[in-house]
Amino acid sequence: MNLALETAGALPLYREVKRLLTLRIAAHEWPPGTPLPSEGKLGGMFQVSIGTIRKAIDELVAERIVVRQQGRGTFVATHNPSRLLFHFFHIVPRKGERQLPRTRMLSFRRARASAEEAQKLQIASGEPVYRIRNLLLLADRPVILDDLVLPQRLFPDLTEKIFTGRDNTIYHLYQTRYGVNVLRTSERLRATIAESDAAKLLGLKKGAPLLEINRVALTYHNAPVELRRSLVDTSAHEYFSDLGKAER
Amino acid sequence: MNLALETAGALPLYREVKRLLTLRIAAHEWPPGTPLPSEGKLGGMFQVSIGTIRKAIDELVAERIVVRQQGRGTFVATHNPSRLLFHFFHIVPRKGERQLPRTRMLSFRRARASAEEAQKLQIASGEPVYRIRNLLLLADRPVILDDLVLPQRLFPDLTEKIFTGRDNTIYHLYQTRYGVNVLRTSERLRATIAESDAAKLLGLKKGAPLLEINRVALTYHNAPVELRRSLVDTSAHEYFSDLGKAER
DNA sequence: TAGTGGTCTAGACCACGTG
DNA sequence: ACGTGGTCTAGACCACTAC
């Protein structure tokens, strides 16, 4: 009964429902933290059975776009500290419990995207970007040096003050102030050697080994929204990767 | 209608079906590569509806224990090269297509598990293990130095000859000869510095940066079956991690 | 043509959270 | 008590594979 849908071209009904739901979530019709209409109501809206709605939402749950809570409803995912800790922050102590870092901004500049950055961010070469350098502390010791590149277009009025003033995570800021919801990341890691400036900031000798992480953060429809290069002192911490648990 | 199941203790029916299927797969009732009975037949065997069977198999598919093929059947997963390449081998060229490595064994020894190894492998300290050192080549150049630790109990008659003689991947050998099916891995990464022996084997200067990967390979019920420490020359290669696509 | 998995429906009942 | 998601069922039809 795809009365209201029809637009589909050989796409299974539940995929079409999923596509429409994702579009409306991305358009902030239901902002992060708010509940979707109940499954029954969605079935009425789209003129499909509740089973089809459930199958569509099943996939949104698997992609962490929404979160189900029995007895309460289905909610658009938000950037709370625990989500950040488990899905986006992979640096853990070699011994002991994982913890969230404190951030200290070192610099905030406006610049233009290099050809390589533009390609990775899927913007035009030379488009305005922010370049931000942060030092991340774990247990009050500097462990990570982050260099971020953000398209100015996505974060129009971002200032050093706004960035520093937040009392929550960076991705929470992107989400609440700019409606940019980071859903997943793609990372490439390699070993490198501390240059003099990184060594100084991390309290290491020049030539010490560092873990370099090049990250692209992605939002709905896998659109890139942030580049991040992290240099990590792995003398007391590690990068944790629990792959294959159930990806797609 | 849980006539034949009953054993469940507040466990949803489809989870109980999944548990029983996993047990029987792990017991090699249906070896890797063979099809399960059809969904209809399984429904009859367990006295549940086909929808419940499908939900159980859905989760087995998500965990890559089985693979569905429309029109053919549902098959127990096997270690073919493409599966290895995409799920278990994360080293990719910084530029260019990913490729499978060639392996050259450097040493094969029988030894006893250290306390730390025993703990990670969930065996008794001092239990017999194999220690194997391999050099992995990509595009005919040495890139990875692997040190493996395997419990002898799981691989009773393993010899250097068997290990070297295989013309397939290591995990394929575990599976076909010993019925040990590696399903997922848990890895911890850090940056380190090449010692003299590693440097020599990888064709690097002593003190060059290396990516160190400590892996635990897991089979059904998350039982550990192999420890592996890899040292990777990341001057021309990287570790690729596409996290958050849809894990659980 | 027969058998397999893939989609979709409709309805019953359970478990949980809130008032 | 009510509304939410969670489980389970039964049956129809479609799409693909093999013979």
Image: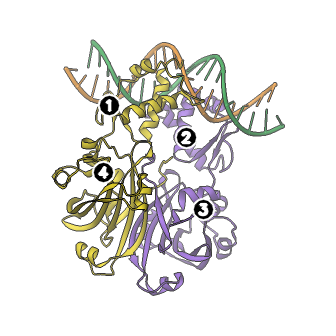
Chain colours: A yellow, B purple, C orange, D green
Q: Secondary structure at mark 3?
A: helix
Residue A31: x %, y % from top left: 30, 34
- The residue tagged 2 is B20
Task: Using residue A229 as the reference point, say whether residue A134 is left or right of it.
Answer: left
- Which residue is pictured at 63% across the width and 47% down the height? B76
Q: Chain of mark 3?
A: B
- Which residue is pictured at 42% across the width and 30% down the height? A21
Q: Secondary structure at mark 2?
A: helix
Q: Amino acid at mark 4?
A: Gln
- Closest to the observer, B96 or A114: A114
- The residue tagged 1 is A30
Query: What's the distance in space between the residues labelled 2 and 1, CA to CA?
Result: 40 Å
- The residue tagged 3 is B171
Mark 1 vs mark 3: in front: 1
Query: What is the crowding at mark 2: few (fewer than 14 residues within 10 Å), some, or many (at least 20)?
Result: some
- Which residue is pictured at 35% across the width and 63% down the height? A229
Q: Amino acid at mark 2?
A: Leu
Residue B98: x %, y % from top left: 57, 63
Q: Quadrant of residue A164?
A: bottom left
Mark 2 vs mark 1: in front: 1
Q: Which mark is residue A152?
A: 4
- Which residue is pictured at 65% across the width and 46% down the height? B29
